[in-house]
Image: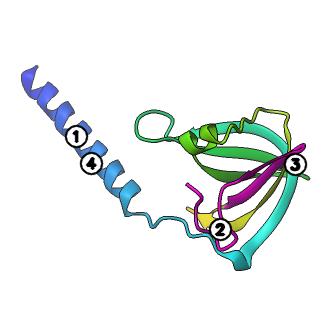
Amino acid sequence: MIRHGLIQKSVLSLAVTFVATVGFAQAPLKYDPATETKVKGTVEEIRLVPPSGGKPVVHLVVKSGAGTVEVFLGPKSFVDDMGASYKAGDQVEVTGSKVTQNGADLILAREVEKGDDKLTLRFKDGKPAW
C-alpha cells in the first residue's frame, strides 16, 4: 500500500514537472505590426488562462462571420484596472496582430472597442501598455 502511494506521488510529480517545463519552454508570443488585422464580432466566451493560480490573463472568444477567433487581451489585473469588462453577447471590434500558437490562430489585441469605449492594451509598435 505504501509503495503504491509512493509510485502515484512520483508519477504525479513527474507529470507536474513536465507540464510546467513545457509551459515555460514556449516562446512568448510576439506582436507583429505587419500581421495587424481588425475583427468585428460577438463575444461568446471570456477565458482566464491559467484559470487558477498564477496571474491570469484574459482571452475572449469572438464569433466573427462563420468562425470564432481567440483574442488575447492581457493580464486580468490590467484589464480590471482600466475598468474594462466583457460578457457573452457584447459586440466588439478588435485590432491586433494575428499569430499562431500550438497550430491555432490567435489575435494579440492592441485595442478593443465596445460601443463608445476603447481599451488600449498595446502601443502602435506592439509593446504592452501594462
Proximity of marks 1 and 2: CB atoms separated by less than 8 Å? no
| Residue 43 numbered tag | none
Is residue 68 shown in magenta? no
Work out whether 27 lies above or below 43.
below
Closer to the camera in the image, 113 or 96: 113
Furthest residue in direction top, as rendered:
1
Q: Which badge, 1 or 3, comes first in the chain's sequence? A: 1
Of callouts 4 and 2, the N-terminal one: 4
Q: Position of residue 109 (x, y in %)?
A: 69, 58
Name the N-terminal-most of marks 3 and 2.
3
Q: Circles 4 and 2: CB distance less than 8 Å?
A: no
The label on residue 99 is: 2
Name the disc covering residue 13, or none: 1
Q: Position of residue 47 (x, y in %)?
A: 63, 38
Q: Is residue 63 left or right of residue 103?
A: right
Q: Nearer the viewer, mark 4 or mark 2?
A: 2
Residue that numbered label 3 is attached to: 41
What residue occupies the far bottom of the structure in this picture? 34
Task: Pick the quarter of the image with the N terminus.
Answer: top left
Is label 3 in a helix, a strand or a loop? strand
**Residue 109 highlighted magenta (yes or no):** yes
**Residue type at the position of mark 1:** Ser
- Residue count near mark 4 (Cα–Cα under 10 Å), binned few <14, some 14–19, many ≥20: few
For the point 72% across and 35% down, the residue is 85
Separation of marks 1 and 4 at Cα, in angstroms: 6 Å
What are the residue bounds of the magenta stretch? 106-130
Say which residue label 4 marks: 17
Above or below 95: residue 64 = above
Tell whether label 2 touches label 3 (CB within 8 Å). Answer: no
Crowd band around label 1 with a 10 angstrom C-alpha radius: few (<14), some (14–19), many (20+): few
